[in-house]
Amino acid sequence: MSQKTRVRFAPSPTGPLHIGGVRTALYNYLFAKKNNGTFILRIEDTDQKRYVPKAEQYIIDSLNWAGIPFDEGPGKNEMLGPYRQSERKELYRQYAQELIDKDKAYYAFDTSEDLDRYRNEYQEAGKTFIYNWHNREKLNNSLSLDENIVKQKLEAGEAYVIRFKTPLNDTLELYDLIRGEMRIDTHTLDDKVLFKSDGMPTYHLANIVDDHLMEISHVIRGEEWLPSLALHHLLYEAFNWEAPKFAHLPLILKPVGKGKLSKRDGDQLGFPVFPLNYTDEKTGETSQGYREAGYFPEAFVNMLALLGWNPGDEREVMGLEDLIAAFDLENVSKSGAKFDIEKTKWFQHQYMQKQSLEELTQAFLPILKEKTDKIFETAYVSKVIGLLQERAIFVADFWELGSYFFKAPDTFDEKAVKKAWKEDTTEIVSNLLIFLQEQTDFTSSILEENVKAWIQSQELGFGRVLMPLRLSLVGSMQGPHVFDIMEMIGKEATLKRLQYASANI
C-alpha cells in the first residue's frame, strides 16, 4: 500500500448527486489537499438496472462548479484506471475466483424463489432468515453439494452467485477515524453476495478490489456504509492486503432534525438538495440546483463544510484555502448535522458582501436585459449594485431591491400610500416640484442640503415631504438614501415620477 494520501469519491450514476454526496466529495478533497494527496473520482456503475446515462457528467459538472475537481478519474490522469467499474468487469471475476480457490467464498445456486421460501418459513417460526454459518452447509451451494455436481452446474451454465464465507467464532476489532474502536462478533454477519448472476460484482467486492488497486490510503464515506465495515475488513484479510484507514461521515439531517435530508424535504420547504438543476428523463420533472437558485459556489461549499465539521474555533466564513488548512477528521461530528436553509442563506449573504462590483455587475446584466428593453451603461448598473449590495442575498435580488433605478414605478404600495399620502400631500409635492425644477446641482449631498433647507423654510415636518418623495420615486418605502436615488436617476426622471404620483395617487 502506498504511503501517499490517496482518497476517492465513488458515487453511483443512478440519478442526481445529493448535497450529502457533494459533502462526502468535499471532505475527501479537503483531506487530500491538506495532506498533499490525490483526490480520485471513481464511477461505481455495477447497478446496471438503475444506471442513468447523464448522471456521470452531472457528477463531474457538480464537482467542477463547486471548485473541487478530481485529480484522477474518467478521462483525466488515468494512471490506475479505468475508473468506471463497468469497464473492470473481468478483473472482479478474477478476484472472486481467487477467494473461491482460497476457500474464502463459495458458489450459491439458490434461486430467488428458494430464498423467498426460506424467509417465509423462518418468519412463520418467528425467526429471521440469515444466509450464514448456521445454515449454509444445508443450502444449495458448493459447500453442501458434491464437487462433481458443482462442476456440472457450472458447465451447464446454471445461474449462481458467489458468496463470502464469513469466518466462525471471530471477534473483529475495527477502528474508525471518527467513531473510534468497534467490536463485531462474526456470528452476527451474513454471507454477503460478492458476485451476481448477471456477471457483475456487488459493491462490496468491486469496492475493495478497486480501493486496493488504486492504492487508496483513506476511505472517507457516508455512515450508511458503516454496517459494511466488518465485511470489508474481512475481505482485506482474505486477500491478505493492507486495509486503508476508514472514516464514516454523519448524515445530513432534515431541517426538523430527524431523518436523512431528502428531495421531498426540499420540495416541501422550497430549497434545493442538489448542486445543479436536474431533469428526470422519465418524468420530465426538473429539480432546482444551488447554482440555478443563485448561490455562489464558495458559499455553498462553506456551508457544506460546516455541516458536520468545525475548524476547532469560532470561524464560520472560510474560503476553500482556509478550509483546506484547517480540515481534519478529528473535528468531524459523530452525530448527524441538521440542515438549516436560513443559515445557508446567511453564508450566501456573507459571500455577496465579498464579491467585487465588477463580478456582480457582469452577473446581473443578463437579468437586467430580460427585465427591460432599455440599455444602461455598465458604470450606472455598477453604481446601483453598490447601493444595494449590503441588502442583497442573490444577484437576482438587485432587480427586486432596485427595479426603480431602471424603470419608473407605475403602481404604489397601498400601505405606504395610506401612511405617506395625506390630504395636503399633492399640494406639498407640487411645491416641491417647482423647487426641484430650479435646482442646477443634482448631486446627492447638495440636494439633501437644499431640500432639507426648503422643508424647514416651509415649516413642514421632514416625514411630510420625504415619505411621499420616496414613494413617488420607488413605488414603496424601500430603497437606499432617497437623495442617492435622485442623483442616480437624474433630474428629468425625478420630476416625471413626482408628476405621475401626484396625478395617480
Image (spheres, helix red, strand yellow):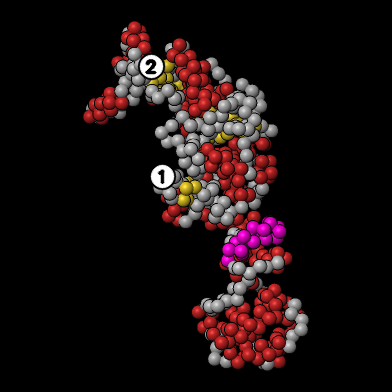
Q: Residues within 10 Å of mark 1 (few under 14, many from 20)?
A: few
Q: Secondary structure at mark 1?
A: loop
Upstream in sequence: badge 2 or badge 1 = 2
Q: Circle 2 sits in a helix, a strand or a loop, which is it?
A: strand
**Magenta highlight: main SS:** helix
**Residue for badge 1:** 282
Q: What residue lies at 64% left-to-right and 23% top-to-bottom?
A: 2
**Looking at the rendered structure, which numbered label has been put on residue 107?**
2
Using the rendered view, name the quadrant where residue 136 is placed. top left
In the image, what residue type sits under mark 2? Tyr
The answer to whether residue 61 is visible is yes
What's the magenta region? 355-371
* Quadrant in which residue 151 is drawn: top left
Q: Is residue 370 above or below residue 197?
A: below
Q: How far from the left and from the top, in percent, is residue 100?
A: 44, 14
Give the amino acid at mark 1: Lys
Q: Are marks 2 and 1 in contact (CB under 8 Å)?
A: no
Dot 2 surroundings within 10 Å: few (below 14), some, or many (20 or more)? Answer: many
Image check: 346 left or right of 171?
A: right
Residue 368 is marked as none
